Image: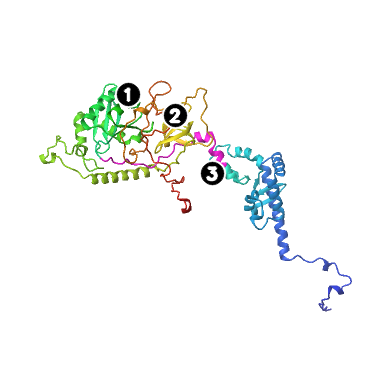
Amino acid sequence: MCIKLDKDDEAVQKLVIADALSRSPQLTTAESEVITLSEDVEAYLSSVDISWSCAASDKRLKEIAEETRKDRLIQEAIRYTKEGWPKYITDVEDNLRDYYAVRMELSVHNGLLTRGTRIVLPAPLHDDILKRIHEGHLGITKCRDRAKAAVWWPGINGRIKRIVEECRHCQEKKPTQSKEPLIPTELPQRVFQKCAADLLEFKGQSYLVFVDYYSRFIDLAHIKISTSAEVIKLLKSMFARQGIPEILVTDNGRQFTSREFQEFAVKWGFQHVTTSPHYPQANGEAERAVQIAKKILQQDEPELALLIYRDTTISATGYSPAELACGRKLRTTLPTLPENLESKTFDKTAVTASDAKAKQSYKNCFDKRHGARPLDELLPGDTVLQKLDGEKHWGSPAVILQQCAPRSYIVQTPRGSLRRNRRHLRRSRNFEPEQSSSRPSPVQNDFSLYTSQVPVTGEPETALHASDPIQCPESRSSEGGPATEARHSATPDPGDSHPSSSSTPRMTRSGRIITLPARYKD
């Protein structure tokens, strides 16, 4: 038997009694997708809740939920998350704009506001969580990675950076700072205008080394007793042969920092310049002369070896020390024509250009070899930690008093004021020098009346390896013995001259020069 079905549409108004199936319509495709998505979200949140239970106890989560209910900002963020955020950021209060920026990642679960899988913590819990994040004394990047796996609040990255930088343990264990770019010494304008002196020990004997910055002419003398009086006696003999230099650069040995030597500098009319203690690179010319002198003393006939050195051409200048200092070549054991020993003039411009080219080449090699980069300039009042090259950890908190030369600072410590190179100082955020009941006042400049009256022209010159020689007279140590470290007054010496901070370009940590917009240059 065949059945033929006919389809007939009737208006709803004409249906007196509707059948049951007409009242249970099928879901459209869009509505089905919404329900499926809702179910997926619920399942995801349930899985997240399980992970929280593994990472934090129920008691801890209840504590966070309780503090969350008390936090007005988080409650406002929860309300917006449930009801919908405004279309424009200007429609929310300023304190909620950080939440607005991540609104697409926010959700609410069991009374907690979350950003993805991270709990948004209220303010009262921030300090405790930061301590837990930094429990292993990891660096900034690692601590931020730990935080990304668990918690979040606006500004958490800045707080992590601050707490790591202020951690005393982390600061003390930091490695030695990298070397700074080399600042070559400028060649003086004439011979024996600027000289350097230093002492050396060889086979139990002491020697005084005297070198001219322009010609590299070296004078060497045996010293019986390493006292200021003996050093002064030998220097007088050298000055009698070569003339009195305008500037004499030395380290901070007790022979050069005594009152007797300062009086000698004033009486003979030269400016005495000292370099940063514990930083021999600052007097690179003298240190190099000491190396040459030791090689000379190792010879069977040191006098002949010294003569040969003086008559040998220096590659940086293209002339021998004798040619630049005496205007002629010296007669040695090598046979030579008489006309070669006659007095000759030399081209000062060519010498200066050749010397500058050689020093620039050395600077490029030094900077590349050591990965040199400039360190931030320190300002008066900055708190720093000290660490000399031979020490293992940073310590001895101090406060910057002044910058007495490029890369050289006077710092205030419980023992008094000391002079340190920038390489030996690391900026610290929250360290304060330990207070002592018998803390001495800043050491005054005992030799302010004994500074040289010879004017120094031109910009301050710097040593070949590091630039910080400056006229900073020394004083005796608080223990009563000669000071091996430079101690200075907190007030600047009028005789000191160094580039002001305004003439030094400001640079970022990566080494880029900061250039201000034109509207700020007025």
Q: Residue at x 56, y 37 (%)?
A: 136
Q: Are marks 3 and 2 in contact (CB under 8 Å)?
A: no
Amino acid carrying mark 3 in the image: Thr
Which element carries disc 3, helix, strand or loop? Answer: helix
Q: Mark 3 or 2 closer to N-term?
A: 3
Percent position (x, y) of residue 265?
A: 30, 28
Q: Nearer the viewer, residue 348 or 330?
A: 348
Residue linked to disc 3: 141
Residue linked to disc 2: 417
Q: Mark 3 or 1 closer to N-term?
A: 3
Percent position (x, y) of residue 486?
A: 39, 29
Left or right: where does residue 174 sit relative to residue 355?
right
Q: Quadrant of residue 251?
A: top left
* Label 3 to label 1: alpha-carbon separation: 55 Å
Left or right: where does residue 270 sit relative to residue 131?
left
Amino acid carrying mark 1 in the image: Glu
Tell me where the magenta segment starts and ends, as one range.
160-189
Q: Residue furthest left?
A: 338
* Residue 140 in sight from this viewpoint: yes
Residue linked to disc 1: 260
* Residue 298 in sight from this viewpoint: no
